[in-house]
Structure formats: structure tokens, C-alpha cells
Image: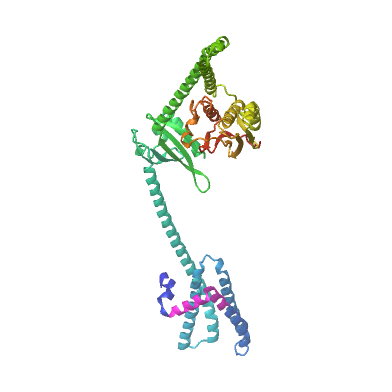
């Protein structure tokens, strides 16, 4: 009988199916242990039974030893099944083989008993089935192992097929991604610097494509400076370090990024290379750098012009003021009321012109004449400004207060100018009521937000942007004197400190000017 027929015996013969069902319910291992226990029990009881028989005691003892040995083997095999290389689902197979062997041997003995006399049928029925059980267990173990190996091979084959399908799907996704990589290319290089995979859409401006690089070593494709740059960075990547660099190829600028690919043990087996054509971006950056350079140069010339113009205007203005003073001393008594009014307009105009020139000088020198940014205590700056404005505060009966102010990184003289301009404006534009001004500060990450709040006349929302422009005063000269430069100077100073300045206000409801300044690390006050 072939091995395939033996393996599937209980599936081929209907008579065996009830046995398989019973053993499946009991459990193959339990059935073998139970059968071994029965034989051991019989080996103990049989000598007592044999004493009532005419056969010699030695024969009865041999029968008991053989049955007991078979029982011990069955119990040992059943106990060791979990340690064998047999899956638990095939334990029933071992038990079926065992009970089949017993059944076959019993059948043979019954047949022999029917056709011939046995020396001692009882002995035969006890010994031979026990030995058959041992033989059946051995055959069953072999069959179960074979089934286990077949099942394991089947599972591994299925896993390999699934893994292969996943690898093919992953490779297809990678190729699709690489082939559609925009404005660049993706490649893998091995330890010989050979391009194992190359794909992408960045070859259009060049006179070679991905197929020309596929399978080729870097040394066989590039030369000169390009080869030196690529080889150096690729070898660094294969040593385990990612790199990034720029390389010009046939007049096009490419940005390369490389990354080492490692296996489960952490060993680098290839380098992933991604390149992108950044020629247009580099051209734009060069133009932008040139534009910034031109703007800086233009601003420098404008600052020099503003300073020179303001400085040169002071001398003729000083002459005008001097002659006005001479006229007042010599002819002041001879002027009528209208003449005195016109003379006052002339003096006031000269004074305003002087203030504007001084403002322009301050505005033009914010960048060039500023000190280095160092830790500055704003509380001290606030106190100094209040002392400078003491006369204006007393005359207007202003109430100027401040919370605890922090240390910031700045130019003390310029920050003093910011506070003086903002506090002067708050006092000046207070309306009919005595001015109420409050200064506070709030930490915002790496900055401090300083606010100067008043209860004055406020600013219309449509005018809040233009107040920081030069000569853009919002109120008439007759109501409020000023040059329209103070807030523009504040903005330039704050911007030099890397901050911003803005206003929150409603007309008739007061204003709050806020500006940001860099904080000093670990500073509290």
C-alpha cells in the first residue's frame, strides 16, 4: 500500500471515521496516555489472574513485563508529544495509527483463532496488540511528522508567495514614484558606486537619460570635478552618513540629497540618491540677492543724502533765525498788531523747520549711528524719560504710570527715544481731560510686547497705517504742534531691534501703541 494511502487511511474507509471523531473529542495525546495506562494496569493485574491458570508463573510474568513495557512506551510517547516536532493538530494522527494497529492485530488474531488452534490465545491477545500499539505509535509519529513538515512547507510557501507579491507591489510603487519624480531623479547606488536603479523626470534638459546611467558606475559616467564631488559624497553615504550638496551638470544646477539604506542588522547595503534641478531657483535667488544688495546700497545713499541735506539746511536756517532775532530787537517796537502776528508766523515757521530738520537727522541716523544691542532695563529708561518730560507732565497734570518692566536686548538711547516720542504723543493728544498714560509689558515667547496706553482722542481705523510714515501727522498744526516724524523714527528703531510696532485705537476712545522687543534670556525684570 502506498504512503499516500496509509496517510489518509481514516479518510478513505468509512469504518475509521467514527474512531477519528472519538479520538478528536477525547484528544489524541490523552487517548495514547489512556491506552498506555490500561496496559500498565493489566501488567500489574495479570500475574494475579495467571495464578488461577495452569500455565507456569514465569510465562505469566513475561506477559506482564511485555504489556507493562508497551504501556510505559505509550505513556512516554504521549508525554513527550508536545516536545516533538509535531503540530498539536496532528496528535490525533498518532493516536489513530496506534489504535488502528491494535485493531488490525486484534482482527488478525480473531481470524487465526477461527481457523487454527493457538498455543495460548489469551497470551496472544494480550502481547501482540500491545506490541502492535507500540508499532502503531511509531508509524503514527512518522506520519504526523510528515504531515507537520508538509503543512509547514505549505505555510512557508504561502508566506513566500505573499511576501513576493508584496515585494512586487512595493517595487511597482517605488518605480512609479521614481519615474514620476518631478524635475529631478531618484537612484540607488551599491558599494561599487554602480547605479542599480535610476528613474525620474529631471533628464529632459540633459543629453543623457536614466537608461544611460542604469547599471553604470559613477566613474564610467562622470569625470573631473563632478566625479570628485559625487564619489566623495556617495562613499560618505555608504559609510553611513547622509549628505547634501549642489552640482552643476551641463549648465544646470542640481541639488543632491543622499541617505544610507540599511538592513535589519544595521549594515549599509546601498545609498539612496535624490537630485532636483534647481537652476531656475538659483537664478531667482541670485537676482534676489542682487536686488537686496542694490536696495541696501540705495538706502545707504538715501541716508547719506538725507543726512547731508538736513545738515546743510541747518546753516541757512540758523541765518534766518538770527536775522529774525535782530529784526525783533531793532524794530519790534515799531510793528503794529498785524506786523507782530506776521512776525510770529515767521518765527514759528523757522522753529518748525528746525524741528523737522532735527527729525530728519534722527530718522536718517537710526541704522548708522545706533549702539550695539545689549541688555537694557526698560524700567530705568521709563524713569529717565519721565524725568525729561517732568515739565510737560506737571503742566498737563498727567498721570503717567507703569507696571514692572523687563530687561530687553536693545540700544538704550534709541529705546529712550521711542518712549519719549510715545509718552509725548500720549500727553499731547489727551483731549480736554488730564492725560492718563499707562505702560506695561507681556512676555510672548522670545519677545516682550510693550504697550503704551492712553485715554486721549484716539485714531480713526482708516488712519492707523499712515501715522508711521514720514510727515504724516493726522492733526492740524493749529491744534497740535508736531513734525510728523516721531512715529516714523519709532518704527525704524523698533525694526532695527527686530520687532514690530502697531496701534490699537478707536476715535474718541484712546489709543494703545504696542511694540515688540527681543527678550534677554532668563530675564525677569
38 is higher (above) or lower (below) than 312? below
Q: Position of residue 186 (x, y in %)?
A: 41, 40
Q: Position of residue 144 (x, y in %)?
A: 48, 69
**Quadrant in which residue 439 is drawn:** top right
Of all residues shown, which one is farthest toward the top? 330
Q: Which residue is at the front of the view, 2 or 119?
A: 2
Asked if the stretch drawn in magenta spans residue 251, the answer is no
The N terminus lies in quadrant:
bottom left
Q: Tell whether 216 sits left or right of 393.
A: left
208 is higher (above) or lower (below) than 144? above
Which contiguous range is marked in magenta? 15-36
Instruction: Answer whether residue 313 is visible to the viewer in this image.
Output: yes
Q: Which residue is at the front of the view, 169 or 492?
A: 492
Q: Position of residue 402 (x, y in %)?
A: 64, 36
Q: Position of residue 3 (x, y in %)?
A: 42, 70
Main SS type for the magenta part?
helix
Instruction: Answer whether residue 307 is visible to the viewer in this image.
Output: no
Scheme of image coloration: rainbow
53 is higher (above) or lower (below) than 468? below
**Quadrant in which residue 394 is drawn:** top right
Amino acid at each position: 500500500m502506498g504512503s499516500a494511502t496509509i496517510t489518509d487511511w481514516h479518510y478513505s474507509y468509512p469504518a475509521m471515521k467514527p474512531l477519528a471523531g472519538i479520538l478528536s473529542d477525547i484528544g489524541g495525546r490523552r487517548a495514547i496516555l489512556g491506552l498506555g495506562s490500561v496496559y500498565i494496569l493489566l501488567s500489574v493485574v495479570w500475574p494475579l489472574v495467571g495464578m488461577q491458570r495452569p500455565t507456569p508463573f514465569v510465562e505469566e510474568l513475561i506477559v506482564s513485563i511485555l504489556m507493562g513495557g508497551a504501556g510505559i512506551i505509550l505513556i512516554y510517547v504521549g508525554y513527550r508529544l508536545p516536545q516533538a516536532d509535531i503540530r498539536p493538530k496532528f496528535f490525533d494522527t498518532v493516536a489513530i495509527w496506534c489504535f488502528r494497529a491494535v485493531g488490525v492485530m486484534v482482527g488478525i488474531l480473531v481470524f487465526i483463532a477461527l481457523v487454527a488452534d493457538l498455543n495460548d490465545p489469551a497470551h496472544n491477545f494480550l502481547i501482540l496488540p500491545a506490541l502492535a500499539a507500540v508499532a502503531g505509535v511509531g508509524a503514527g509519529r512518522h506520519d504526523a511528522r510528515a504531515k507537520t513538515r508538509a503543512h509547514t512547507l505549505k505555510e512557508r510557501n504561502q508566506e513566500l508567495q505573499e511576501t513576493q507579491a508584496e515585494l512586487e507591489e512595493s517595487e511597482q510603487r517605488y518605480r512609479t514614484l521614481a519615474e514620476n519624480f518631478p524635475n529631478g531623479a531618484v537612484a540607488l547606488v551599491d558599494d561599487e558606486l554602480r547605479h542599480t536603479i535610476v528613474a525620474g523626470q529631471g533628464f529632459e534638459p540633459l543629453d543623457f537619460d536614466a537608461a544611460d546611467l542604469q547599471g553604470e558606475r559613477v566613474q564610467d559616467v562622470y569625470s573631473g570635478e563632478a566625479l570628485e564631488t559625487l564619489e566623495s559624497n556617495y562613499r560618505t553615504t555608504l559609510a553611513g552618513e547622509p549628505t547634501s550638496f549642489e552640482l552643476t551638470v551641463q549648465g544646470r544646477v542640481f541639488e543632491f540629497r543622499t541617505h544610507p539604506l540599511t538592513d535589519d542588522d544595521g549594515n549599509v547595503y546601498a545609498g539612496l540618491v535624490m537630485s532636483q534641478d534647481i537652476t531656475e531657483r538659483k537664478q531667482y535667488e541670485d537676482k534676489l540677492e542682487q536686488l537686496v544688495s542694490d536696495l541696501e546700497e540705495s538706502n545707504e545713499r538715501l541716508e547719506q543724502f538725507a543726512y547731508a541735506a538736513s545738515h546743510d539746511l541747518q546753516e541757512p536756517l540758523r541765518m534766518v533765525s538770527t536775522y529774525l532775532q535782530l529784526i525783533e530787537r531793532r524794530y519790534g517796537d515799531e510793528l503794529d498788531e498785524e506786523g507782530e502776528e506776521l512776525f510770529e508766523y515767521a518765527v514759528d515757521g523757522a522753529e518748525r523747520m528746525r524741528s523737522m530738520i532735527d527729525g530728519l537727522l534722527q530718522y536718517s541716523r537710526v541704522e548708522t549711528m545706533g549702539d550695539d544691542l545689549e541688555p537694557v532695563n526698560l524700567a530705568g529708561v521709563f524713569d529717565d524719560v519721565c524725568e525729561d518730560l517732568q515739565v510737560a507732565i506737571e503742566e498737563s497734570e498727567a498721570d503717567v504710570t507703569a507696571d514692572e518692566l523687563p530687561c530687553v536686548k536693545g540700544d538704550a538711547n534709541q529705546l529712550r527715544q521711542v518712549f519719549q516720542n510715545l509718552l509725548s504723543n500720549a500727553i499731547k493728544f489727551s483731549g480736554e481731560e488730564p492725560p492718563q498714560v499707562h505702560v506695561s509689558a507681556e512676555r510672548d515667547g522670545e519677545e516682550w510686547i510693550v504697550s503704551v496706553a492712553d485715554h486721549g482722542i484716539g485714531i480713526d481705523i482708516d488712519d492707523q497705517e499712515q501715522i508711521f510714515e514720514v510727515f504724516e501727522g493726522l492733526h492740524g498744526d493749529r491744534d497740535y504742534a508736531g513734525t510728523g516724524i516721531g512715529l516714523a523714527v519709532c518704527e525704524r528703531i523698533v525694526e532695527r531691534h527686530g520687532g514690530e510696532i502697531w496701534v490699537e485705537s478707536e476715535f474718541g476712545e484712546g489709543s494703545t501703541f504696542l511694540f515688540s522687543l527681543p527678550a534677554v534670556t532668563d530675564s525677569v525684570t
